[in-house]
Image (cartoon, rainbow, N blue to C red):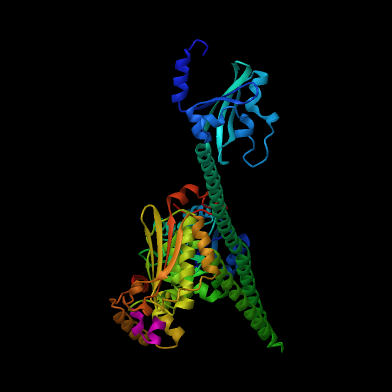
Amino acid sequence: MAALRVLVADDNALLRQGLARLLEDAGIAVVAEAGDAEELLRKARAHRPDVALVDVQMPPDGTDDGLRAAREIRATLPATKVVVLSQFLEERYALDLIGDDASGVGYLLKDRVADVGALVEAIERVAAGGSALDPEVVARMVGRRRADDPLADLTPREREVLTLMAEGKSNRGIAALLQITPAAVDKHATRVFDKLGLGDEPGEHRRVMAVLTRLRAS
Amino acid sequence: MRGAPPELLAVLLDSIADAVYVVDHEGRVEFANPAALELLGWEADDLLGMPSHATIHHHHWDGRPFPEADCPLLRPRTTGETVRAEDDVFWRRDGSRFRVAYSSAPLATDHGRGAVVVFRDVTAQLEAEEALRREAVAQARAEELHASRARIVEAADAERRRLVRDLHDGAQQRLIGILLALRRAADRAARAEADAEAAGAGTAGAGGDVAELIEAAARETQAAIAELRDLGSGLHPQILTNRGVAAAVESLTGSLPLVVTLEIPERRWPAAVEAAAYYTIAEALTNVVKHADASAATVRVRDDGGELVVTVADDGRGGATPAPGRGLAGLRDRVEALGGTLAVGAGASGAGADAGDAAGAGTVLEARLPLTAAAAQAPPAHGDGDRAPG
């Protein structure tokens, strides 16, 4: 398999270079680096990387320029998937980024760089058209108190499965994490979908979208 | 005057509203018209022949004696000039006083040069003017106070935004840099360990210790990053600047241990109003969690054109209005700085509680934030370089 081609965008040069070296050590080809949103868009168009790794807050405005650029890449460069690295634990940013399509997109807290294995796994998942939502963001969404909570009927195991599904993990990935068989994951997933009143969705990113929409609406 | 018939003069002096009297060369009252007698409270028979200064002009308003030698009223007799005053005092027969404006002009009498004095009671007029002036001064002071309160709040907000930004660009980034370095160090250590094992060196275990130490350092660093993230978002959530009240409150309520229903329009308002609305909601919800023993709360924000009405209602104990602690006092300052009002009261049937049950009626906090005034007076919303997207 050819190495994944990745663009790294962060206004902090030390961090950007550190991240690039970390990824290269892990066998990923960093084809370009960008220090602001404009450079990011220009280099994304020029290099057509498999994945753009983007910091939320960057010049020129220093607000959420990176996030907006990431959305533009998703809208205009379908071959380039996007993983946003953020220092902000905000559902809203993640949902804004995802829009109505959870394929080929990720929103991770920046300190995930500490677990390079998980980071690379998330980047690969997104590159393959899946999704990667930060566990803390998902935990915040799942943990939110609701009137007539549809999650109240879930068993702890089903809740775990739901959480991992929302993070974008595949059945195989969930099975490995929970140390159960993929068939068992399937059964849990079906029951979760029943209890939440969702139809079974083919494909993991469709499944993520359905779960997020349900969590959002309630 | 010289040409006017004496009868006309007499009729004129009798009927005009202005008070007129005449003093002779010795300063004695020789004539006074009815308006003058009325104002001074004298009968003509008693006043005529009296020394005018000693009778009606003997003291200043504040009670200091007024020496006759200094009296400008009598000066026309000796100098021939005409003297005017806008604010002097005359004393009535009964000892009361009133404020006068007058002019005194020289007048030839049978025995030498005297003076004719025309005067008006200007007490009411001057007092009204002074009251207006005092009011204007008070108003200006109040406005200045109001503006300086608004400036203080705005400066504090700008400082918070700057702090959060510095945290983000500084300490938080550095910690992530450290995390990256630790990760690479751990990889090196692992590789060195593997090489050593492959070489058959009997030092296994040392590399494992290093890996563990690095792992511990990484965990601590991550905890510090999480703490700084919470600190920053508590100081001034970046999402409030970037996305507004609805998104910021949604984020705030995500981890609260109670059901919070949000009715907040997805709209932007002036930064000072958004900050006041956000901190009002945050403080109110903190109080609900701490004191109200509530299971649910409702947050409503309504833009009625003139003002933003923010209400936070809970279904808790109610009755006992949350102690107006420092948080609430600070909130009141913030709200009033914008010309708004803050009220805390018992809820009627807020947050879905059954009406009629006083104990379960909960508490309602309501802030009203004027939109027009704030929009007009708000300084450039993000003077420190922050910018809110359209």
Residue A159 colored in magenta in the image: yes
Does the magenta stretch mainly form a helix, a strand or a loop?
Answer: helix
Q: Residue at x 50, y 37 (%)?
A: B125
Q: Is residue B377 visible?
A: yes
**Residue B55, quarter of the rendered image:** top right
Q: Is residue A168 visible?
A: no
Q: Position of residue B231 (x, y in %)?
A: 57, 69
Please give left or right for residue B378 compared with residue A145 in the image.
Answer: right
Q: Is residue A148 above or below residue A108?
A: below
Q: Position of residue B52 (x, y in %)?
A: 61, 29
Q: Residue at x 44, y 72 (%)?
A: B254
- Which of the pair A9/B40 is nearer the observer? B40
The residue lying furthest to the top in this view is B3
- Which of the pair B95/B295 is nearer the observer? B95
Q: Which residues are magenta?
A: A149-161
Q: Residue at x 52, y 11 (%)?
A: B2
Q: Position of residue B132 (x, y in %)?
A: 51, 42
Please give left or right for residue B275 compared with residue B180 in the image.
Answer: left
Q: Position of residue B93 (x, y in %)?
A: 56, 38
Q: Residue at x 55, y 32 (%)?
A: B46
Please give left or right for residue B189 compared with residue A209 in the image.
Answer: right
**Residue B232, quarter of the rendered image:** bottom right
Q: Is residue A178 above or below residue B367?
A: below
